[in-house]
Image: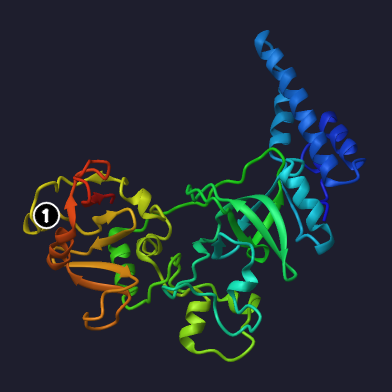
Amino acid sequence: MTPVFNLSAQTSSSLSVDLDSALSKKTDIVQKEAFIKLVSVRVQTKVDALLKRGKISEKLTQFTDILNNISMPFSLPREADITSLDTDIRAGRITLQARANGPTPVFYTGSLHDIFGGSTGTGLLLDEYNQIDPLETIALSGTTFQIVGMSLDHGNVIYQVTIPDYPYGSEKGYFIDARFVDIVWSPLATLALREKHLPAKETILANLRNSLGLPYIWGGNVPTGVPKLLEYYAPKWLVSEELRAKWTFRWVDCSGLLYAATEGSTPRNTSTLVTSGTGIDIAGKTSAEIVLMLQPLDVIAWKGHMMIVLNKDEVIQSRADYGTETSGFQNGVKISSLKEALDELLVSRLPLNSIDDMVPEGKKKFVIRRWY
């Protein structure tokens, strides 16, 4: 569990050799981290003093860089170590981070066994809306996590995490299965965030259309799903193809539709999308007037839902329920008339230029944002 650390492989300086020797005498990871932090403070104090006097030691600045770049692989902990590791992490004695090695479901509970089959192993834990309520989102490959706690769930290691790339608070916390990530011990450094590459507009539009027909699932944003869930939380009996798709989260919610189409380059939640980009001047306008102002990929949104403009005639969205009188599939990703969607929206909501603009009591609102 304790990583092998060899500074002498990185530099031949006497300071590094001394640090390597001192570290080797520390018997566990807590002692190693405490020592590194102590040395870091003392070296930085010395560097600051030299800077104030107009002098600086190149050797010391190089040594500071070495300390800040310490980041070593950390193996999956044993069951017997979980309690002590959790205590040390929460007390700030160990700094562990992780990086997703594939799509990683994020939940607001650490009891994942109850979600996937429970005692019978044949059904998912669904709420009254037929959704997997504890699912928060699916972090994309390369996403980094700060580990703030550990626990065991029926023999599986669960990490409680914060997610720098997901700036949304949770009173219950966020939890991931340890098997979805690679963990590192990094006492002074911070893992770089996942790199984002916004696709071309034509690619995004094609991705949106390719999602047509995908069912709706709260928290879903990976159309191909997470196949490893069938391995890590295998159903005990044969299940239908529909249940297998839901078991692996092979569906998308409203903002997850755009997030998937842009390969994770747009904000994940509507609470941020309503302020992204530039607001369109729609206040007081009719649906016909608004249509003339729109461009492909403009987002029609309010806190809780969003739809995406495809062209002057069409809008695409993922909804949990389109109503019993709607022809075709009743939930999921659907393309409909832009004009009709705006007409329907204007019955219940006021068009505003900013989501923070005030509306009369009892009225709801929506905005349109141009982000591309």
Give the x, y percent position of residue 74.
75, 54
Q: Is residue 116 visible?
A: yes
In the image, residue 76 sits, relative to residue 120, either above or below, namely above
Question: Would you identify the image quadrant in which residue 234 lies?
Answer: bottom right
Looking at this view, is 211 or 46 the one in front?
A: 211
| Secondary structure under the numbered disc 1 in the rendered image | helix
The residue located at (69%, 52%) in the rendering is 149
The residue located at (75%, 44%) in the rendering is 94
Q: Residues within 10 Å of mark 1 (few under 14, many from 20)?
A: some
Looking at this view, is 62 or 243 the one in front?
A: 243
Would residue 94 be found to the left or right of residue 318 on screen? right
The N terminus, quarter of image = bottom right
Would residue 185 be found to the left or right of residue 23 on screen? left
Residue farthest bottom in this picture: 238
Question: Would you identify the image quadrant in which residue 202 lies?
Answer: bottom left
Residue farthest front in this picture: 361
- How many marks are shown on the rendered structure? 1
The residue located at (22%, 45%) in the rendering is 279
Looking at this view, is 246 or 74 the one in front?
A: 246
Residue farthest top in this picture: 53
In the image, residue 145 sits, relative to residue 320, either above or below, namely above
The amino acid type, in three-letter code, at marker 1 is Ile
Question: To which residue does mark 1 refer?
Answer: 290
Give the x, y percent position of residue 132.
49, 71
Looking at this view, is 341 or 56 the one in front?
A: 341
Would residue 262 be found to the left or right of residue 153 on screen? left
Give the x, y percent position of residue 89.
73, 46
